[in-house]
């Protein structure tokens, strides 16, 4: 078999192969045997006609039909032997079969381009440091206590620690009620952070049967154009209730902390630790995302379109499966498809870049690392180490571990500067 691998572009290759008829004769004979089972010829039972008659009547058609199957099979044999890595569905661009003489074919496919990655070391990245305030901890305790609080009737709305029941009347810009735009007995929890700030502020100090005004602004996109519409309301208060905090007993603290604390100091300490762990993870993710974005930006290249398409499909499939798993109704596939288009291209580029960095820096994942990972997981899951190793070798664990090692290398070689998150937000707003 004569094989030529043509480099069409940085991400596209073509296998050009020519085989003699003798080299494919066994596959041709297999094709005759399979086709003969389906053929009916007068004077013979189905599948029982002599091979000589079948060859005479249908030989050329059977061989031409088999030639494409044989070409595809030989292509994948070449891929395995040469350790090629197609990243999208291969496409046959030419086939030339001469019965009794030869089979030639050309098949094109995409590969991840190899290139020298630039500017991936000594990159300056800011790491936001989140300061935990006593007010944050107090607010978290309030949230934990919320399910245990009782409601008492109150004469007026003294603070946000209230729940009000209102009748809402939509009005026009002159304050005239709009017919058919009235809703009654709407319950609003003023302690909920998602509640319109105008409602919280304008309800303060009000009593039953008193009213207050507020405006709700709805912003939405029509295509790429942003539309904004104002809705004006008059709210009539029909009921006011105040949240009453329970006494923080040892029993209650144990309950809300799930036995991790037994007094207020221990509870605050536990909450602080949780915040620290959360913010540490957040900071690390921000550093990683900014670092990788900078590296992708520093290395402009064209990613294989077919590979981008497969990454795009995988991202959509993951969202679809998550929607099923968490029983989310009204999965909007069109919106998800549009959302992931630019992200698919970015992810495809990053995967190509990380593999080129791994090769340049000799970063690898060997079998012992997969075995160690399997041992740790086996202790947690109870699944045998052997089963886990087999599963991990067949899955994408190796790629995941390689990505972790590359990211660690990049962060270790980056210039990371700590900045106060709150101050950074103030600067952006200013």
Image (cartoon, rainbow, N blue to C red):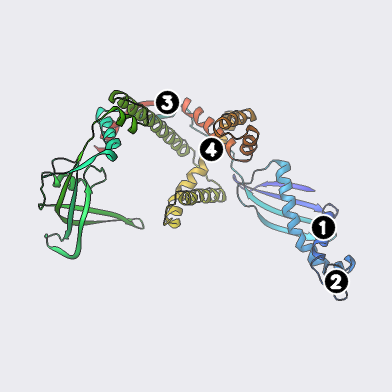
Q: Residues within 10 Å of mark 2 (few under 14, many from 20)?
A: few
Mark 4 or mark 1: name the one nearer the start of the chain: 1
Mark 1 or mark 2: name the one nearer the start of the chain: 1
Q: Nearer the viewer, mark 3 or mark 2?
A: 2
**Residue that badge 3 annotates:** 415
Would residue 284 be found to the left or right of residue 427 on screen? right
Q: Position of residue 131 (x, y in %)?
A: 30, 27
Would residue 185 be found to the left or right of residue 220 on screen? left
Q: Residues within 10 Å of mark 1 (few under 14, many from 20)?
A: few
Answer whether residue 215 is visible to the viewer in this image.
yes
Mark 4 or mark 3: name the one nearer the start of the chain: 4
Separation of residues labelled 1 and 2 (CA atoms): 20 Å
Q: How many marks?
A: 4
Q: Residue at x 78, y 52 (%)?
A: 18
Q: Nearer the viewer, mark 1 or mark 2?
A: 2
Separation of residues labelled 2 and 4 (CA atoms): 61 Å
Q: Nearer the viewer, mark 2 or mark 4?
A: 2
Would residue 215 be found to the left or right of residue 28 on screen? left
Separation of residues labelled 3 and 2 (CA atoms): 80 Å
- Per the image, label 2 sits on a secondary structure element best described as loop
Separation of residues labelled 4 and 1 (CA atoms): 44 Å
**Residue that badge 4 annotates:** 353
Mark 3 or mark 2: name the one nearer the start of the chain: 2
Mark 2 or mark 4: name the one nearer the start of the chain: 2
Q: Residues within 10 Å of mark 4 (few under 14, many from 20)?
A: many
**Residue that badge 2 annotates:** 45
Q: Position of residue 45 (x, y in %)?
A: 85, 71
Q: Are marks 1 and 2 in contact (CB under 8 Å)?
A: no
Q: Position of residue 87 (x, y in %)?
A: 60, 46
- Per the image, label 3 sits on a secondary structure element best described as strand
Mark 1 or mark 3: name the one nearer the start of the chain: 1
């Amino acid at each position: 078999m004569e094989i030529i691998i043509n480099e069409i572009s940085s991400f596209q290759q073509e296998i050009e192969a020519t085989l003699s008829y003798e080299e494919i004769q066994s596959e041709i004979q297999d094709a005759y045997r399979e086709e003969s089972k389906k053929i009916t010829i007068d004077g013979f039972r189905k599948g029982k006609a002599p091979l000589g008659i079948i060859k005479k009547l249908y030989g050329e058609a059977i061989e031409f039909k088999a030639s494409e199957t044989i070409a595809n099979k030989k292509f994948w044999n070449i891929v395995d032997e040469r350790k090629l890595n197609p990243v999208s569905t291969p496409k046959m661009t030419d086939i030339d079969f001469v019965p009794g003489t030869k089979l030639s074919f050309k098949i094109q496919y995409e590969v991840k381009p190899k290139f020298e990655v630039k500017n991936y070391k000594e990159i300056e990245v800011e790491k936001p440091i989140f300061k935990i305030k006593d007010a944050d901890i107090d607010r978290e305790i309030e949230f934990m206590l919320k399910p245990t609080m009782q409601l008492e009737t109150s004469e007026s709305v003294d603070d946000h620690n209230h729940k009000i029941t209102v009748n809402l009347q939509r009005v026009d810009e002159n304050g005239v009620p709009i017919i058919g735009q009235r809703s009654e007995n709407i319950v609003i929890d003023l302690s909920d952070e998602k509640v319109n700030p105008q409602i919280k502020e304008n309800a303060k100090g009000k009593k039953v049967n008193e009213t207050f005004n507020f405006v709700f602004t709805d912003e939405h996109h029509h295509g790429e154009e942003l539309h904004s519409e104002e809705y004006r309301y008059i709210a009539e208060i029909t009921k006011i209730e105040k949240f009453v905090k329970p006494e923080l007993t040892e029993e209650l603290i144990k309950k809300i902390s799930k036995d991790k604390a037994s007094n207020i100091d221990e509870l605050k300490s536990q909450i602080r630790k949780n915040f620290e762990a959360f913010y540490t993870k957040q900071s690390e993710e921000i550093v990683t995302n900014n670092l990788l974005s900078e590296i992708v930006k520093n290395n402009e290249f064209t990613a294989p379109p077919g590979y981008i398409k497969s990454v795009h499909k995988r991202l959509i499939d993951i969202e679809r499966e998550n929607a099923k798993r968490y029983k989310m109704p009204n999965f909007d596939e069109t919106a998800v498809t549009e959302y992931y288009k630019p992200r698919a291209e970015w992810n495809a580029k990053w995967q190509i870049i990380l593999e080129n960095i791994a090769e340049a820096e000799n970063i690898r994942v060997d079998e012992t690392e997969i075995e160690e990972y399997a041992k740790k997981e086996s202790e947690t899951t109870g699944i045998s180490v052997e089963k886990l190793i087999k599963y991990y070798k067949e899955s994408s664990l190796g790629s995941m571990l390689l990505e972790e090692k590359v990211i660690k290398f990049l962060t270790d070689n980056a210039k990371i500067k700590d900045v106060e998150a709150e101050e950074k937000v103030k600067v952006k707003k200013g």
